[in-house]
Image (tube, grey):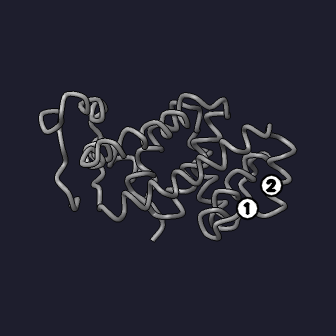
Amino acid sequence: MARLPYLDEDDLAEEDKDIVKRPINLNRIIAHSPEAAHKFSGVGGYIRFGSSLDPRLREMAILQVGYLTKSPYEYSHHLKIGRDFGVAESDVTAIETETAGGDSGLPELDRAVLRGAREMTEGMKLSDDTYAVWAEHLSEAHIVDLTMVIAFYNGVVRLLGALEIDVEPEYAPELEKHPLPE
């Protein structure tokens, strides 16, 4: 159960109602700090709608962060969102395989994106080998954007966990299909 009450439009000043325009639990909690919520949404909006980074790769990186950190909220949301951006069931299985140290058979860049997300999540940096693959396949702008995606979602999972934000019922079936590791 969340540590703060979930807010709705009626709880907010007129100029802040847009925070819960998409009434997911994350937005309903961060609405307690409207200015922070607007800034948070700005970065999140850029990541999803402003960057020209391949959206499938972006979602793969986010899913890797959610899976590795065992964040039910993040993982369930991006399993659903990821499908809209080209993440296939085989990609989700590949994340599980790669996390366990196996070879998923994904292309080199995909594997390096997942490896980079694991490196940044577990060790707070990126190895030279992983960076070399990114640099071979991505523009400098895309390297920055991908790094920002991984860093931002590492922050998001910590926010979700610290405030104990609940998974909404419509996302819960995603976790039944793809449970997080113990």
Residue 103 is marked as: none
Residue type for callout 1: Leu
Q: Are marks 1 and 2 in contact (CB under 8 Å)?
A: yes
Categorize mark 2 by other alpha carbons within 10 Å: few (<14), some (14-19), many (20+): some
> Which residue is tagged 2?
131
Q: Tell me the SS state at disc 2.
A: helix
What percent of the width, then of the height, locates residue 46?
54, 33
- Calculate the distance from the C-alpha at mark 1 to the C-alpha at mark 2: 7 Å
Residue 164 x %, y %: 29, 61
| Residue where numbered disc 1 is placed | 126
The residue drawn where x is 69% and y is 67% is 101
* Left or right, residue 118 beside residue 109: left
Total numbered circles:
2
**Residue positioned 48% across, 66% down in the render:** 181
Observer-nearest residue: 9 or 55?
A: 9
The first of marks 1 and 2 along the sequence is 1
Tell me the quarter of the image containing the N terminus. Answer: bottom left
Give the amino acid at mark 2. Answer: Tyr
- Residue 126 in the image, given as x and y percentages of width and height: 73, 61
- Occupied quadrant, residue 115: bottom right
Q: Which residue is drawn at 46% across and 36% down?
A: 42
Residue in the foreground of this view, choosing between 78 and 141: 141
For this view, does 1 lie left or right of residue 76? Answer: left
The foreground one among 59 and 139 is: 139
